[in-house]
Amino acid sequence: LSFLFSKPPANVLEGDSMDQDVESPVAIHQPKLPKQARDDLPRHICRDRTKRKIQRYVRKDGKCNVHHGNVRETYRYLTDIFTTLVDLKWRFNLLIFVMVYTVTWLFFGMIWWLIAYIRGDMDHIEDPSWTPCVTNLNGFVSAFLFSIETETTIGYGYRVITDKCPEGIILLLVQSVLGSIVNAFMVGCMFVKISQPKKRAETLVFSTHAVISMRDGKLCLMFRVGDLRNSHIVEASIRAKLIKSKQTSEGEFIPLNQTDINVGYYTGDDRLFLVSPLIISHEINQQSPFWEISKAQLPKEELEIVVILEGMVEATGMTCQARSSYITSEILWGYRFTPVLTLEDGFYEVDYNSFHETYETSTPSLSAKELAELASRAELPLSWSVSSKLNQHAELETEEEEKNLEEQTERNGDVANLENESKV
């Protein structure tokens, strides 16, 4: 029975890295060589060329490692210009913000200068009997300043439009309306970008490793989530996806196929009250994609587990989403998470120094399917252990010894009765 339990190497935690790469069907394309050249290569070079490296589908910080290339219909980005501006980086967003206002001020300043130039206001600057379109407008710079005052509704009172200029009145109305639209669009864009809940996800943390161990007599995959802020996530829910390439029975290859991992959808355990760190558990049963995976087979698997935590920010009411992922090298078989919640004087305290820590525990190295078959044959619960089995053997041996003593006593009594009868 000792083959069911195997102690993992001591350097499991030390050798694991958050961004460690393992083998994956996502290959780095190598230049094709002629068959003769491939045959002449040394064996170790051929093996190196066949090695494949994984690229995370979702990085540990939650960013998706996917780039869109060869997008020909780029006009679609302009149809939703507001979302396009919000998605831009801050440096480009600020640049566009400044450029839009500057261009509109220059454009309308040029029109004010053209009106004054065409009407001849520039030729009658010192003529007190001449009524200009805009008083004290004597050049392009003054026209530019008047454009800024009009669009921003500053109104210093030095440059004023007169009632003798109907074209200037129409331009004033147009600039006021367009200026309000520009202000609403750009200020709204900046407000949405500032209030985005992406930074709120920075305080939602996931454990660096996932673990597989026994819980309530069943083999389970577990990981831990926590919230570092005192303001809670409302209506928090957790989801998990298995990212693994597959080939159908018809021969179709599906790269990075997504499979749901049940983390309590039918029982409501996926809806969280995230006040303190919680351990999310996935029971490995017949519907689980890990049903036939054992401890020895796990490092050979080419898979990635993506976990998604969603909820509403209590302070703003906006939806927030935090993501992380685990590859095979970050799944520890036979470990559990160290408790982080302790009861103090009148309150509970969370020790986030132990949030990522795990400890080793006795766990069968067989797959959940093999354990179920073994338990059905032996009619034993899945949580049986070597010690319990030895205790059962010891109890059987004790019962056999007691029976032997009783039989020996009965035999001795029968012999004594026969001797007494013979004497009589």
Image (tube, helix red, strand yellow):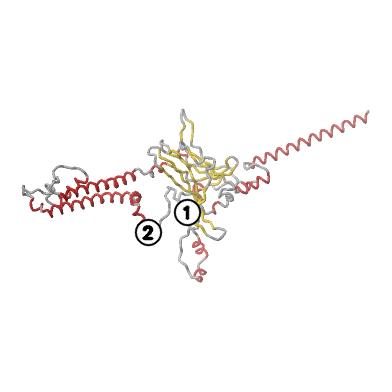
Per the image, label 1 sits on a secondary structure element best described as: loop
Inspect the image, locate mark 1, and give the three-letter code of the amino acid beneath it. Asp
- Return the x and y of residue 57 as percentages of the image width and height: 46, 52
Kindly check if marks 1 and 2 are in contact, taking CB atoms under 8 A apart as contact: no
Above or below for 311 versus 44: above
Identify the residue at image location x=52%, y=59%: 253
The structure residue drawn at horizontal position 38% and vertical position 60%, both measured from the top left corner, is 72
Task: State the residue position of label 2.
Answer: 73
Q: Is residue 141 left or right of residue 288?
A: left
Which of 51 and 226 lies nearest the eye of the viewer? 226
- Locate residue 31, reporting x and y percent: 45, 66
Residue picked out by circle 1: 21
Percent from the top left, x then y, of residue 35?
51, 70
Q: Is residue 61 left or right of residue 247?
A: left
- Name the foreground residue: 38 vs 266: 266
Give the percent coordinates (x, y) of residue 336. 53, 42
Q: Nearer the viewer, residue 110 or 177?
A: 177
> Which mark is nearer the camera, 1 or 2?
2
Q: Tell me the amino acid under the disc marked 2.
A: Glu
Q: Residue at x 73, y 39 (%)?
A: 397
Structural crowding at the residue carrying mark 2, measured as other residues with C-alpha within 10 Å and reported as few (<14), some (14–19) or many (≥20): few
In this picture, residue 362 sits left or right of residue 357: right
Question: Which disc number belongs to residue 419?
Answer: none
Could you tell me which secondary element the residue under label 2 belongs to? Answer: loop
The residue sitting at 57% across, 52% down in the picture is 297
